[in-house]
Amino acid sequence: MIFDKPFETCDMEKAKKGYEVKVTVKNSNDRLDFSFYISENGSTTLSVSSTNRQSISYYGDIVKDKEK
């Protein structure tokens, strides 16, 4: 599966206690919708839905790299 075209949409908005980013990409066979929720404390959810595949979600934390 190769997506070699620019994002179809990319929107960001301030949510209650963080940010929500939505990105859509398409190729000739599929469309993927990525929805990121990033809270003020760094906890993050990514949900991916597809036209041809089952949806999936990821949960985690964004942390700053330790300085070298």
Image (cartoon, rainbow, N blue to C red):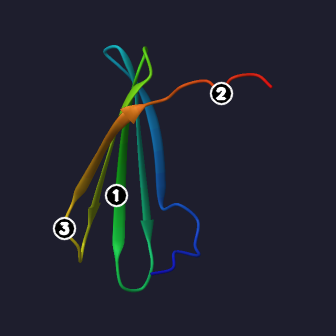
Q: Which mark is residue 54?
A: 3
In the image, what residue occupies the spot 49% across and 29% down? 62
In the depicted structure, whether residue 11 falls above or below residue 28: above
**Neighbour class for label 3 at 10 Å: few (<14), some, many (≥20)?**
few
Residue bearing the label numbered 2: 65
Quadrant of res 24: bottom left
In the depicted structure, whether residue 58 falls above or below residue 3: above
**Neighbour class for label 1 at 10 Å: few (<14), some, many (≥20)?**
some
Q: In the image, what residue type sits under mark 3?
A: Gln
Circles 3, 2 touching at the beta carbon (< 8 Å) = no
Residue bearing the label numbered 1: 33
In the image, what residue occupies the spot 36% across and 65% down? 32
Locate residue 27 relative to residue 57 in the image: left or right. right
Quarter of the image that includes the N terminus: bottom left
- Secondary structure beneath label 3: loop
**Neighbour class for label 2 at 10 Å: few (<14), some, many (≥20)?**
few
